[in-house]
């Protein structure tokens, strides 16, 4: 049965659907020897589909994990600068996993990884708005005024974002420790929000995504999600 190429690539476990769309647009996908176009469909039982010159693997067992990403590790399957990436932390797993969403190199905390592209797409698509909560250490003057600005509608990289839920957890010399909850999850969103509010982020740790909490998972460690956690996140991503 013919299906959209990005869905077939996601189902193979190589990458999430949005990344698959980018790969198609970049000309990395061919169907029967012809460079594919975004929007077209193919049938795995009839057509020969290649990504970067290699045939798509058949669907494997779906795996879902939560990882406590350390600071200094990049969320990439391969880094052109040779920096340490998250795949090194899950190399004991036989399946090839990819990160769900973004967590920049200087940030730490909760990162989901999977080989289920459809599940990843549910959690990362902007229209689904799965909540993400960060512990945020900041430096700056006039903390009360900065908090009010953070709680108002803002624009990041030309895109309007919903007001964040911001709580002052602790006053610190020259700054504060905050809890910041956002919905969209744009690239370096919390850092850019704080910059607009006159604050400099010195540490950023994601501690919750949807109903899933980081808990006492130590830095660099991971565990598989339970079936109940996977299904609950799937429902939250569908809302």
Image (cartoon, rainbow, N blue to C red):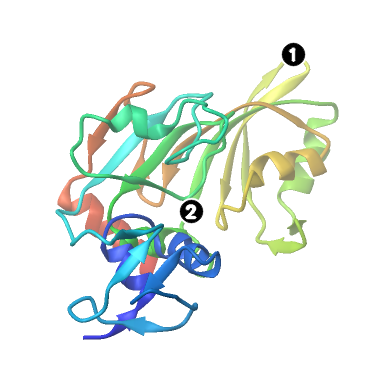
Direction from residue 26 to residue 141 in the image, left or right? right
Asked whether 78 or 113 is in front, the reply is: 78
Crowdedness near tag 1: few (<14), some (14–19) or many (≥20) residues, C-alpha within 10 Å? few
For the C terminus, give its image quadrant.
bottom left
- The residue pinned by badge 2 equals 131
- The residue pinned by badge 1 equals 173
Q: Is residue 118 visible?
A: no
User: Circle 2 sits in a helix, a strand or a loop, which is it?
Assistant: loop
Farthest residue to the top: give it.
173
Asked whether 40 or 226 is in front, the reply is: 40
Crowdedness near tag 2: few (<14), some (14–19) or many (≥20) residues, C-alpha within 10 Å? some
Direction from residue 226 to residue 113 in the image, left or right? right
Q: x, y percentage for residue 191?
A: 69, 39
Earlier along the polypeptide chain: callout 2 or callout 1? 2
Against 45, is 143 above or below?
above
Alpha-carbon span between mark 2 and mark 1: 30 Å
Against 182, is 217 above or below?
above
Against 54, is 177 above or below?
above
Q: Residue at x 36, y 44 (%)?
A: 112
């Amino acid at each position: 049965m013919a299906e959209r190429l990005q869905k077939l690539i996601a189902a193979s476990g190589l990458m999430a659907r949005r990344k698959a769309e980018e790969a198609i647009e970049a000309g990395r996908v061919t169907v029967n020897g012809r460079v594919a176009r975004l929007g077209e469909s193919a049938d795995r039982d009839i057509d020969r589909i290649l990504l970067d010159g290699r045939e798509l693997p058949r669907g494997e067992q779906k795996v879902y994990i939560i990882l406590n990403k350390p600071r200094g590790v990049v969320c990439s399957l391969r880094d052109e600068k040779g920096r340490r990436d998250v795949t090194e932390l899950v190399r004991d797993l036989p399946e090839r996993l990819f990160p769900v969403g973004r967590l920049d190199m200087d940030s730490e905390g909760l990162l989901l990884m999977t080989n289920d592209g459809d599940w990843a797409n549910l959690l990362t698509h902007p229209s689904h708005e799965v909540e993400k909560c960060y512990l945020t250490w900041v430096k700056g003057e006039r903390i009360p005024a900065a908090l009010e600005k953070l709680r108002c509608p803002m624009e990041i990289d030309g895109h309007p974002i919903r007001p964040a839920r911001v709580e002052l957890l602790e006053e610190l010399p020259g700054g504060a420790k905050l809890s910041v909850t956002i919905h969209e999850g744009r690239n370096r969103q919390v850092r850019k929000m704080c910059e607009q509010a006159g604050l400099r982020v010195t540490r950023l740790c994601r501690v919750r995504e949807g109903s899933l909490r980081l808990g006492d998972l130590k830095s660099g460690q991971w565990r598989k999600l339970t079936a109940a956690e996977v299904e609950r996140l799937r429902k939250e991503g569908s809302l």
